[in-house]
Image (cartoon, rainbow, N blue to C red):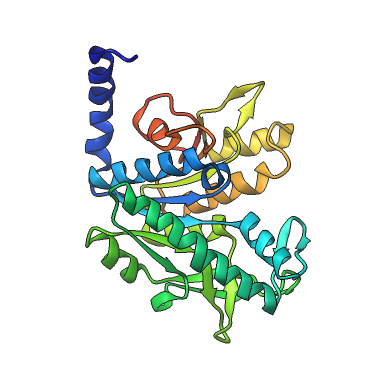
C-alpha cells in the first residue's frame, strides 16, 4: 500500500509536467495489447481522460488489424499480406470500414466516455479529414499515403473540449476510400498540427541496447545504432519514421510499451519514463 507521503511526492513531481503541457497537443497511436487486453483498455481510457482533464489536447488514432482479419475470415474473404502489410482489395475496404470506423471506433469512444472523457469517434473520410494518394505501385491495393490533413476540423473539435478518436481511412484522388497504416496516419496528423508529442503505444519496450532500455535518442545516435545492427528489423522503419515526423515540426516522439498498465502516464509524468523518446539534436 502506498503511503500518503509517497502519493504526495508523486503528485508534486508531476506538477512541472502538467504546467508544461497544459494547452499542448498529444497525438497517440493506440494499438497492440493495449487494445486487446480488457484491463489495459480500461487503464488507457483512464489515462487519456486524465490527460484531457488537466488541459492537454488529446487526439487518438487507432489500428485494429487482428479484428479486421477475424471478420474477413468470418466472411470468407482471404487476407493477403505483402512485406508484412495488408493487401486491401475492394472487398477488404468494406471490412476495414466496418471494423475500424464502426465496431472498434465506437467501442473505444464508449469506454473513454464511460471513464469520464469527452471522446468523439470519426474516421478520415468525415469532413475530408484525411486525403491520400494511392501507393504508386499499387502492390498493396487500396492503400494510401496521407497528403492532406484537415487541421481546422481537428482544432475545432479539440478547442471545444472533445477528444477525437480517429479510424485511419482516407479519401483518394478518385474519391475511392483508402486504407491507411495507423502509424503513418498518426504521424501525418501530428506533423500537420505541430504536436508537442506523438506517442506510439506498441507491444515493445522501446529501443533496447545491451539489454537496457534507451530512454532518449537523437537521429545521429539512431543511425549509428542502425549501422551497428543494434537497431534492426522492424524497428528500423519505425525509428526512421519517428525522426521524419520530428523533422516536420513535432517536438518529441515516444515509443512506449502498451502492455504496462498506465504506461502513458508513467512516460509523460516521470523523469525516467518507460519507453524511448526520439528528440531533436539540439
Q: Is 260 in front, or is 112?
A: 112
Q: Is 49 in front, or is 27?
A: 49
Residue at image point 28% right, 15% down: 6
Image coordinates of residue 233 in percent, x first then y, are: 73, 42
Image coordinates of residue 171 in percent, x first then y, are: 52, 78
Residue at image point 23% right, 15% down: 4
Above or below — where is 9 with respect to 188? above
Question: In what quadrant of the picture does the N terminus appear?
Answer: top left
Question: In what quadrant of the picture does the C terminus appear?
Answer: top left
Image coordinates of residue 189 in percent, x first then y, are: 44, 61
For this orientation, the residue located farthest to the front is: 74
Above or below — where is 20 with respect to 177? above
Above or below — where is 54 with respect to 209? below
Kindly indicate the quadrant of the structure image that contains residue 160.
Answer: bottom left
Q: How many marks?
A: 0
Viewer can see residue 49: yes
Viewer can see residue 145: no
Q: Is residue 176 left or right of residue 131?
A: right
For this orientation, the residue located farthest to the bottom is: 174
Residue at image point 45% right, 34% down: 263
Image coordinates of residue 213 in percent, x first then y, are: 57, 25
Q: Is 277 in front, or is 244?
A: 277
Above or below — where is 115 with respect to 101? above
Q: Is 250 in front, or is 258?
A: 258
Amino acid at each position: 500500500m502506498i503511503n500518503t507521503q509517497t502519493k504526495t511526492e508523486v503528485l508534486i513531481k508531476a506538477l512541472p509536467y502538467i504546467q508544461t503541457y497544459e494547452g499542448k497537443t498529444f497525438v497517440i497511436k493506440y494499438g497492440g495489447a493495449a487494445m486487446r487486453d480488457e484491463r489495459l483498455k480500461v487503464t488507457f481510457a483512464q489515462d487519456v481522460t486524465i490527460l484531457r482533464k488537466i488541459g492537454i489536447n488529446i487526439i487518438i488514432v487507432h489500428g485494429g488489424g487482428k479484428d479486421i482479419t477475424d471478420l474477413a475470415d468470418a466472411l470468407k474473404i482471404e487476407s493477403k499480406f505483402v512485406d508484412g502489410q495488408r493487401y486491401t482489395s475492394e472487398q477488404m475496404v468494406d471490412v476495414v470500414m466496418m471494423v475500424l470506423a464502426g465496431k472498434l471506433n465506437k467501442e473505444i469512444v464508449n469506454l473513454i466516455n464511460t471513464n469520464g472523457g469527452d471522446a468523439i469517434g470519426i474516421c478520415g473520410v468525415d469532413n475530408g479529414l484525411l486525403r491520400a494518394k494511392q501507393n504508386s505501385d499499387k502492390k498493396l491495393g487500396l492503400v494510401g499515403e496521407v497528403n492532406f490533413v484537415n487541421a481546422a476540423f481537428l482544432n475545432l473539435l479539440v478547442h471545444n473540449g472533445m477528444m477525437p478518436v480517429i479510424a485511419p481511412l482516407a479519401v483518394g484522388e478518385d474519391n475511392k476510400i483508402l486504407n491507411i497504416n495507423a502509424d503513418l496516419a498518426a504521424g501525418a496528423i501530428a506533423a500537420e498540427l505541430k504536436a508537442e508529442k506523438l506517442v506510439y503505444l506498441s507491444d515493445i519496450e522501446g529501443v533496447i541496447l545491451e539489454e537496457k532500455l534507451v530512454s532518449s535518442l537523437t537521429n545521429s545516435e539512431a543511425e549509428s545504432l542502425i549501422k551497428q545492427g543494434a537497431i534492426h528489423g522492424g524497428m528500423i522503419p519505425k525509428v526512421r519514421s519517428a525522426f521524419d515526423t520530428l523533422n516536420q515540426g513535432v517536438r518529441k516522439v515516444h515509443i512506449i510499451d502498451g502492455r504496462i498498465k498506465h504506461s502513458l502516464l508513467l512516460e509523460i509524468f516521470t523523469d525516467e519514463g518507460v519507453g524511448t523518446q526520439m528528440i531533436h539534436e539540439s
